[in-house]
Every structure is written in structure tokens, then in C-alpha cells.
Amino acid sequence: MSKRSILERVQEMTRQAREREAEKLLTVELVKKAISEAAAQGFSRVAIAPSKPLDLTKTEIAKATLTELRKDGFRLEWEVRLQPDNTSYQALVVSWPDFAPPRN
């Protein structure tokens, strides 16, 4: 049995930490709640950003949420945002058409 290198252990720790952060912010339920709250205020888009400059774009939670929202017809993009210290992170921007066509 071979020992994992320090690099492999650190990479796994990073992945796990990002998944934990994504779980606090990007689950389908949480994103749909944010969408509903934004829509109730009259907005047609919502941006969801981590409180720390972490890249959550490749997390399994983010991927699953985006897949689900695309099925529902939402437009999704990752928007790069810069902090004053030039650290960047990506916010998930979810948007939808302002008005649905009338049903007959």
C-alpha cells in the first residue's frame, strides 16, 4: 500500500473544503430559495457568491445544481468578481425571462 503524497492529501483537503462551502450555498434547495426571494422582489436574476474567495465552480454540488436548474430553463453563468486586494472569485448568476408567455 502506497502512502499518498502531501500534495495529494492537500488537494483532497482543498476539494473537501470547497464541497463543504458549496453545500452551504449552492444546493438546489438553497439556490431555488434565493431565486424565489429575488423574484418576489421583482428581480429577474440573482447572484450567489461565496463569502470567501473560493472556486466552487467544479464542486459536485454546483454541477448537480446547474444541471437541475438548466432542466427548469434557467440561464446560468459564472461571473468573475474582483475584491479590493485583487483576489478573484466566481459568483453563480441565475437569470430567467421577465415574463412568461400567456397560457391559452
Image (cartoon, rainbow, N blue to C red):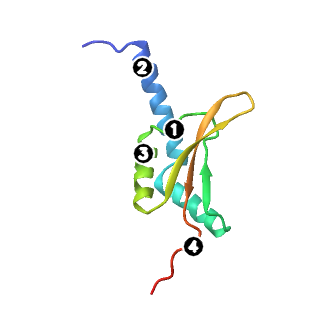
- Answer left or right for 23 relative to 67: right
Query: Which quadrant would the N terminus be assigned to in this image?
Result: top left
Residue where numbered disc 4 is placed:
99
N-term-proximal mark, 4 vs 2: 2
N-term-proximal mark, 1 vs 4: 1
Q: Relative to 29, does residue 9 appear above or below in the rendering?
A: above
Residue where numbered disc 2 is placed:
9
N-term-proximal mark, 3 vs 4: 3
Residue where numbered disc 3 is placed:
63
How far separated are the C-alphas under marks 2 and 1? 19 Å
**Residues at marks 1 and 3 touching, judged by CB atoms closer than 8 Å:** no
Callout 2 crowding tier (Cα within 10 Å): few <14, some 14–19, many ≥20 = few
- The secondary structure type at the circle numbered 4 is loop
How far separated are the C-alphas under marks 3 and 2? 23 Å
- The secondary structure type at the circle numbered 1 is loop
Residue type highlighted by circle 2? Arg
How far separated are the C-alphas under marks 3 and 4? 27 Å
Q: Nearer the viewer, mark 3 or mark 2?
A: 3
The residue shown at (59%, 58%) is 34
How far separated are the C-alphas under marks 4 and 2? 49 Å
Query: Which quadrant would the C terminus be assigned to in this image?
Result: bottom left
Residue type highlighted by circle 3? Lys
- The secondary structure type at the circle numbered 3 is helix
Residue 56 image label:
1
Residue type highlighted by circle 4? Phe
Callout 4 crowding tier (Cα within 10 Å): few <14, some 14–19, many ≥20 = few
The residue shown at (46%, 26%) is 13
